[in-house]
Image: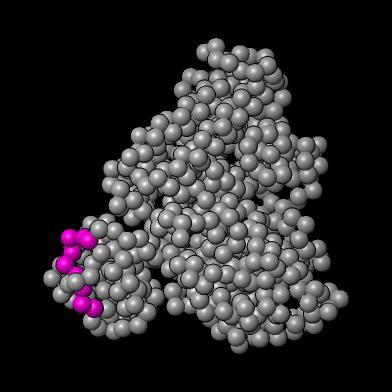
Amino acid sequence: MNKNREFGYQAWLQPGPKLDFPGFQPAGEKGFAYDELVRGLHRIGCRDIDTMINLALCEDIGPQAYKITGSIDGITIRGGDERGLLYGVYGFLSRLRRGQTSFDIFDKPAASRRILNHWDNITGRIERGYSGKSLFFKDGQIGYDLERLKDYARLLASIGINEISFNNVNVCSESAKLITDYLPDTKRIAEIFRPFGIKIIVAIHFESPVLMGGLSTADPLDPDVAEWWAKTAANVYKEIPDLAGFVVKADSEFRAGPMSLGRTQADGANLIARAVKPHGGMCYWRCFVYNCMQDWRDTETDRPKAAYDYFYPLDGHFDDNVMLQIKHGPSDFQVREPNSPLLGAMEKTPQMLELQVTQEYTGQQKDLYALAVQWEEIFDHPITDIIATRDLIGDKIDAVVAVANAGDDSNWTGHLLAQANTYAFGRMAWDPSLTALQVIEEWAELTFANYPKAIRPIIEMVLESRGVYEKYNAPLGIGWMVNISHHYGPSVDGYEYMKWGTYHRADTKAIGVDRTTAGTGYTAQYHPYVQAMYENKETCPEEILLYFHRLPYDYKLRSGQTLLQYIYDTHFEGVEDVEGFIATWESLKEDLPEEAYTSVKERLQMQLANAKEWRDVVNSYFYRKTGIADAKGRKIYE
């Protein structure tokens, strides 16, 4: 086995030195949680002991919640249900691994559903995946390493994930058969994850009644279509009675949906919801709907407005087992975006917050990027305080979902340090009040427990990485300056003349899109308080200034820098910061195992080359546009 696989935040998978904890003699209710406790304690070195560890169910605690009490003389772990007990075991092992030996803990999740969407194709390739091939599919069918998949289930359960979809939401006609021809294999996937408290979701094709049912239409108001979905759902639930539900991407990026048939998004979502409701299932309906055939000459169409325009008028029209899956930002997982105005705006409709763990536009797990830093900002956004969405996890936002970043690479995530993003998602979905510092510290202490000298430098690198990447990426909230085909590396005009929308409209005098009420009107979608903040360039947060405003290159930022000089400075600084990462990592060579050291060193060298390319392409682009040289006389390519 590749030793690099030993690195992971599953402390109980990683053997280590015997801890200063005398041992265990589990008692009380047994079952899967008991097995995981025994397994975990053995793996972290606690074996020959006489301490009593009691496991018990206590419904008064509440579903999925747990309590841990006691000290070295005796530990009691109580769970509000079986999942809560399992989470309590993992919470205990995690804290024990990090040196805690006295406990008085009550913990429960803020969101009842904490979900990962895999974008795995039945071919074995992962769309927007940067960690090898699929854990679930191989050569056109469901195929997996059983023990590896169990390890993955344990890994996810240990951070509180309780639902996953395992096929790509961009469902091809072949993987659409997961609920028909391949149902026995789908059932086996559910059986693997079930003991870990994880329910599966299946991504479905909206046109399945046509593709697989032989019908002439997928019209959601057609009785035959409704009957097909009802019968299909009943058959699926007969085999997988605890299926969480179906996730649907429709009317999006050339995928058919209800709007293409003259129906509303609510008509489509309710069709699926009614099919699964008798079985307790949910319809997770993605709100990533926009005009992907925009003419670049069209200055009125504004892609960020689309989700709100399509869905907000339908508030109250969705069935109660529909959850709208809303991306955190109105664009598409960029380094900087404002929070979507749709989050929290629909008072009569359950919503879920969608994040992205796989680093599609944020370095693709080649460049180091701490998504936890970005998520902390999302959970602490002005929208949260002003329109009271209860930290984005409340009455109408009771689920958090993310696009997964794991694959069959030996260390799960390609870049060893990208494991921090999966860990952070699970922990912050469970408790959105956690800071990036807290979750990254936890991850580093668990992952590198056997290499203590490396822990603090790694924490500092990871924490700084989001800011570093942003420096050499697109400035001040512009986004999208990437190669359109694969979304990695700089192409300043990559999207500007394409059908997907235009984003910076740079000319020789100015850059940015006016999204105020005097421009596209996008700011009007926000609560009046937030609208007023974004509307005024003096109060708009500078990190997203160009997202909302079109400004001349000599515009003075609050630092006194001109906008153009800021672009030059940050792009040079970003490269220097990556060089600093490499120096830090090289200083740890004697404190880490060779394979882990080498794999991260290779990624950092790739990141340095990427940062230099961003610096040179972006700075040269703006120098050629403006003819204004860098005030500090640094090299810019003419």
The foreground one among 413 and 626 is 413
- Using the rendered view, name the quadrant where residue 139 is placed: bottom right
Residue 569 location (% of width, % of height): 52, 22
Specify the quadrant of the image occupied by residue 312: bottom right
Residue at (57% x, 64% y) in the render: 135
Figure quadrant of the C terminus: top right
Does 306 lie within the magenta span?
no
Relative horizontal placement of residue 145, taking residue 42 as reference (left or right): right
Which residue is farthest right? 216
Q: In the shown orientation, is residue 433 left or right of residue 253?
A: left
- Residue furthest to the left in view is 73
Whether residue 462 is visible, yes or no, is yes
**x and y percent of residue 570 in the render?**
51, 26
Residue at 28% across / 80% down in the picture?
56
Residue under the image location 60 percent in, 58 percent down: 133
511, above or below 169, in the image: above
Q: Can residue 287 be seen in the rendering of this structure? A: no
In the rendered view, would you say 278 is above or below 450? below
Q: Position of residue 146 (x, y in %)?
A: 52, 72
Q: What range of the chain is rendered magenta?
A: 18-26
The rendered magenta stretch, by its main secondary structure, is classed as: loop
Number of callouts:
0
Q: Give the x, y percent position of residue 496.
A: 74, 36
Taking 535 as reference, is 249 above or below it?
Answer: below
Which of the pair 349/119 is nearer the observer?
119
Q: How is the image coloured?
A: one colour
Determine the residue positioned at 23% across, 81% down: 27
